[in-house]
Image (cartoon, helix red, strand yellow):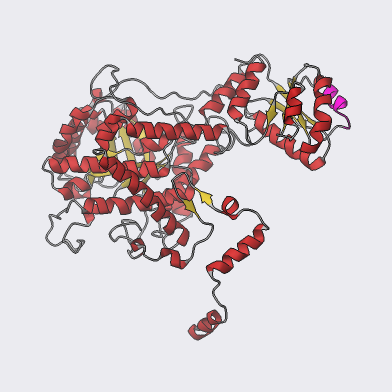
């Protein structure tokens, strides 16, 4: 068999890169290769349509196996099991406990509790965790940043009182003062003095992390992938440096840091992000020379430094940035592919955001779907059985390396500025993310960034039915009372927010605007233009009426008036607009708004005749629809 295989391969010459390029160019039939085939990412690099083995030459990342430094291929070598996490608002200890026990019965293996600071007490913790086997589930806790040390002490006392083996407990306490600085513009630097006390409190619990890098905040604010990664590394390095300066051994400090990343919607980019994150963080920690306290530890480098301390622990949460209020079931598709990318990239735990989160406190159905999305990946798709599925893919390895290089440049730029804390105080981090957010909103408005069901292919008949976007809480919780904001803060809004506001504005109008397609002339062009126009205008909540075609513009205009049209869209070919547009405009005689679908060469002549509304792929869709609403008297 081996001989026959060798003979088979020897009979076929491997095509060269140039032969592949020649074939692609032939198939393109003269089309521009760079425009048609090259992926121009937002991350500052381009990706080719194909890669070969030689493209991986010199990449040290491909030499390591799963479970080996620098952990680009994952922290584990024998499985890819991750924690299925669900977060709970623990305002009431008994209710939260009942919900937690129910979730554990339904397949959840990680719980996240958000505890109000006023409720912190030994009794509250005991009630909250009653009946929960703390050594059989990952437990994560969050409270007011100024009371996190108190929470850690209460947990340590509870675990010790119950007689748990400290080595068997896994979880985290979310201490991240810098996050409040980014989101609220508040000065939380005094809280950084609590780092040493917090770490010492939980030092006896080796699998319990307590210093968090909540980079998912950046993802939910619209950050590009390289920004989330680069800033997260600088953020983590800031905490690591401060802990070491406070006298905490580097190995212990590194093992107490947990990264909470978001999961964006660019599938392969997210796989590359988590792989690159582990690799870069491992190399950062290595520079601190972490020393393992165990003399018998075999996972050490050539310099005897502790490789275990170099492992990045990652919880990944599907982003809210691309979620929508309208056509909200599409959110399930978004979060499913996001969860898949994180799972394939070997993260430690995943939170799937329920599909209804943009407009209500998630209901039981939405939470059940969110849980089952992960359970499906584990129990039916077996994503937990194979480590680093993407490893060895020329495309993914190249993408991982390219993204790592861009993120590293950003990391070094932040370090040159004095570190992440200095950059946050100066507002450069917030400005960079806010600028990206503004750019992405502008791209969405022009349909350069698609949101299915929002700015592309909307559900024509959908109504909000009382759904309204939930506003982010602006109240002041945490260190220092009052509303002083000495620093810049992130301006966060979901990508769909502008279109949703427009559509809700339309719904509140006395009459739903009717857009009538006056289709005439060339069959293929009128159908294509009508389809484009229907999708374009339905994004504002207009009722659209398509038509098979009219023999004359006069007949089309009369049919539109009879249908009660508020907008009449002329749909034809560019060449025929010179013949049809002006007669149609005159026949309509101001009885409705007149729109031409396209940007014909005769546009200047049409404008001179009084036609002022044109829709095509290059216009700002959101701004155009706002202008249409204003002309229709909808405010």
| Residue 300 location (% of width, % of height) | 19, 61
Q: In the shown orientation, is residue 447 left or right of residue 213?
A: right
Q: Tell me if residue 554 is in the magenta stretch.
A: yes
Judge left or right: residue 377 versus residue 622.
left
Looking at the image, which residue sits at the far bottom? 3
The location of residue 264, given as percent across then percent down, is 45, 42
Q: Nearer the viewer, residue 134 or 506?
A: 506
Q: Which residues are magenta?
A: 551-560
Quadrant of the rendered image containing residue 148:
top left
Secondary structure mostly taken by the magenta-highlighted segment of the chain: helix
- Is residue 375 visible to the viewer in this orientation of the structure? no
**Residue 69 % position (x, y):** 28, 59
- Check if residue 157 falls in the magenta segment: no
The residue lying at 74 percent from left, 39 percent from top is: 528
In the drawing, does residue 581 fall left or right of residue 213? right
Q: Total of numbered circles in the picture? A: 0
Q: Residue 99 or 452: which is nearer the viewer? A: 452
Say which of 378 and 358 sits in front. 358
């Amino acid at each position: 068999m081996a001989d026959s295989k060798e003979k088979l391969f020897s009979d076929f010459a491997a095509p060269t890169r140039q032969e592949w390029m020649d074939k692609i160019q032939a198939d393109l039939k003269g089309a521009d290769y760079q425009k048609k085939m090259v992926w121009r990412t937002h991350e500052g690099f381009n990706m080719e349509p194909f890669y070969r083995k030689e493209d991986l030459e010199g990449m040290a990342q491909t030499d390591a196996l799963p479970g080996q430094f620098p952990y680009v291929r994952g922290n584990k070598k024998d499985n890819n099991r991750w924690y299925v996490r669900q977060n709970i608002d623990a305002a009431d200890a008994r209710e939260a406990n009942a919900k937690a026990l129910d979730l554990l019965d339904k397949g959840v293996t990680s719980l996240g509790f958000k505890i109000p600071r006023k409720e912190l007490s030994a009794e509250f913790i005991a009630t909250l965790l009653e009946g929960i086997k703390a050594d059989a589930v990952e437990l994560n806790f969050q409270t007011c940043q100024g009371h996190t040390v108190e929470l850690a002490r209460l947990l340590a006392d509870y675990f010790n009182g119950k007689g748990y083996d400290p080595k068997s407990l896994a979880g985290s306490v979310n201490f991240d003062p810098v996050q409040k600085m980014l989101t609220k513009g508040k000065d939380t630097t005094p809280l950084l003095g609590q780092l040493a006390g917090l770490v010492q409190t939980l030092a006896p619990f080796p699998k319990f992390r307590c210093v968090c890098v909540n980079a998912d905040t950046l993802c939910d604010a619209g950050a590009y992938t390289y920004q989330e990664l680069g800033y997260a590394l600088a953020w983590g390095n800031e905490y690591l440096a401060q802990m070491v300066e406070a006298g905490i051994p580097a190995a212990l400090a590194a093992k107490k840091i947990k990264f909470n990343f978001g999961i964006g919607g660019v599938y392969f980019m997210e796989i590359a992000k988590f792989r690159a994150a582990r690799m870069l963080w491992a190399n950062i920690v290595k520079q601190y020379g972490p020393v393992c306290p165990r003399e018998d530890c075999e996972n050490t480098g050539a310099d005897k430094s502790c490789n275990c301390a170099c492992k990045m622990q990652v919880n990944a949460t599907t982003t809210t940035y691309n979620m929508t209020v309208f056509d909200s079931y599409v959110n399930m598709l978004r979060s499913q592919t996001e969860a898949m990318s994180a799972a394939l990239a070997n993260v430690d735990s995943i939170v799937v955001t329920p599909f209804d989160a943009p407009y209500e406190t998630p209901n039981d159905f939405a939470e059940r779907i969110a849980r089952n999305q992960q359970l499906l990946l584990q129990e039916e798709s077996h994503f937990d059985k194979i480590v680093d599925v993407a490893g060895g893919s020329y495309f993914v390895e190249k993408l991982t390396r390219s993204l790592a290089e861009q993120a590293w440049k950003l990391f070094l730029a932040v370090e040159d500025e004095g570190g992440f804390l200095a950059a946050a105080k100066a507002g450069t981090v917030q400005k960079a993310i806010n600028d990206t957010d503004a750019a992405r909103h502008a791209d969405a408005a022009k349909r350069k960034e698609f949101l299915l069901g929002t700015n592309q292919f909307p559900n024509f008949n959908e109504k909000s039915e009382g759904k309204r976007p939930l506003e982010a809480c602006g109240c002041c919780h945490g260190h220092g009372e009052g509303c002083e904001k000495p620093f810049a803060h992130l301006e966060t809004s979901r990508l769909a927010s502008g279109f949703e506001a427009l559509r809700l504005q339309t719904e509140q109008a006395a009459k739903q605007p009717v857009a009538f397609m006056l289709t005439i002339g060339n069959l293929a062009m009128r159908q294509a233009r009508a389809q484009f126009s229907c999708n374009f205008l339905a994004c504002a909540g207009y009722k659209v009426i398509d038509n098979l075609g009219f023999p004359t513009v006069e007949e089309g205009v009369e049919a539109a008036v009879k249908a009660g049209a508020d907008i009449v869209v002329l749909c034809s070919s560019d060449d025929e607009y010179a013949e049809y547009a002006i007669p149609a405009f005159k026949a309509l005689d101001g009885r409705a708004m007149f729109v031409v679908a396209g940007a014909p060469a005769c546009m200047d002549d049409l404008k001179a005749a009084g036609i002022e509304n044109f829709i095509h792929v290059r216009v700002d869709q959101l701004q155009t629809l706002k202008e249409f609403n204003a002309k229709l008297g909808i405010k």
